[in-house]
Amino acid sequence: MGEFLLVTIQVDMYDRLALNLENDLVTMIKKVEAKGVLIDISAVSIVDSFMGRILGNIATMSKILDAETVVVGMQPAVAITLVELGLPLPGVHTALDVEKGMLLLQKKLNFYEEDEDGDLDQHDSTE
Amino acid sequence: MNNNLLADLLLKKQKEILEQWMKNQLANATLREDLMSNENLRIQSGEMLDYLIKAIKKGNFEDLNSREFEPIVEMLQGLSISRAQQGYTPKETAIYVFSLKEALINLLIKDMADSRELVDAVVLISQLLDQLGIITFETFIKGRESVILRQTQEINEISTPVIRVWDGILALPIIGTLDSARTQIVMENLLQEIVDTGSSIAILDISGVPAVDSLVAQHLIKTVSATRLMGAECIISGIRAEIAQTIVHLGIDLSNIQTKASLAAALKHAFGMLQLEVKKGERKIVR
């Protein structure tokens, strides 16, 4: 979707699958120079500490490749489990559904662009 | 006189025993005519006596775990639980069983000439009815406990309502102490409501929480983290001055959680986040 990647996870993840996802996703971000990644986990009902870590890893890796990660559609039970496991996923942005996630990504992107413009303006004025 | 003969005697005098038992019960000051009519009580007592005499027919007066006693034990338990729920006191329930003992013993005294045999029979009957009394007690307490448990659950459910204060803004007033079990309920209710309404801001109002210790604070932080994971923002409001003091003294870090002094301030902040504006309108009077 434009400069954003949309991943929907439709099955409960097991470890191997999660690792593959991490791999594919990072390669893909590099390939298309994506600016944002949207991970929809609304169909996931079971999550373990490994899965939580993978999500965190993906976010960190994307950040290095200059892309924002938004996790959307988390089930209440999953959220409670992650918190109880002590994994509040720092660095991961969240949104209620895909639509809101997209808005968030766009907002973030615009914000950064504006920021850069602002920087340029400042440079201009100082020069 | 052996056990079988005693059982036969009781069978023969069943009617008489029931009369005596009813008389004892009706004479007692604790009789609750408001909860059960005499007619019903008589039917119930007759049934109970019937079961008892059937149970001891084979001369078994001691082993309450045996098959013959199953119906009477079951009936006693059922009766005891229903009485617990109707609001009888334990005393009133116990008197029900013990007045039967009185009736039985009275009858034995009247009918048995040999004092030695009489003593044996009385001891036997006493032991049996004491055991039945204990069963009644145990079940009565169990019945009460289940009532208390149900009420606790109801209080937990009622005391954590999730309110939609605005389109996209939820408020959750917490009243009472937050323990682990309640936090779980609060969290589940809140997260479910967030999904159902698609709200992006939740206000956790703790004006009704009497004290915040490190455990409660931890529960609060958990709730906020879970809300964030769902993709909603969480604001904690209604923090009283004493609570702010305790939090600082305990060294609890709430710096990455949005906090407001009052629900009004939190709501205002939420409006700001949703870029909503509330204005005082001019009222037009139509004549």
Image (tube, coloured by chain):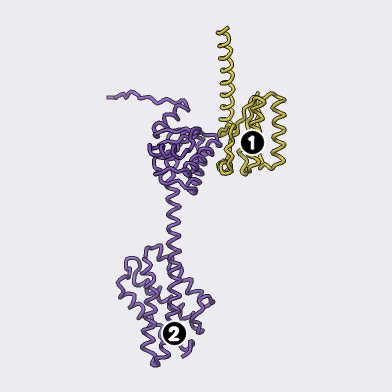
Chain colours: A yellow, B purple
Q: Secondary structure at mark 2?
A: helix
Residue at 55% from the left image edge and 43% from the top image edge: A80
Residue identified by numbered label 1: A55
| Residue B270: image tag | none
Mark 1 — on which chain does it sit?
A: A
Vertical side of B114 occupied by B259: above or below = above
The 10 Å Cα crowd at callout 1, few under 14, some 14 to 19, many 20 or more, is some
Do the dots labelled 1 and 2 sit on one chain? no
The answer to whether residue B163 of the structure is visible from this angle is no
Q: Nearer the viewer, residue B11 or B69?
A: B69
The local secondary structure at tag 1 comes to: helix
**Quadrant of the image occupied by residue B143:** bottom left
Coordinates of residue B255 in the picture (x, y in percent): 49, 33
Q: Residues within 10 Å of mark 2 (few under 14, many from 20)?
A: some
A79, B69: nearer the viewer: A79
Residue B117 horizontal/vertical position (percent)? 43, 90
In whole angstroms, how far apart are the C-alphas of marks 1 and 2?
Answer: 77 Å
Residue under label 2: B11
B111 versus B92 height, above or below: below
Q: Is residue A74 above or below residue B18?
A: above
User: What amino acid does circle 2 point to?
Assistant: Leu
Question: Is B258 displayed left or right of B19 in the figure?
Answer: right
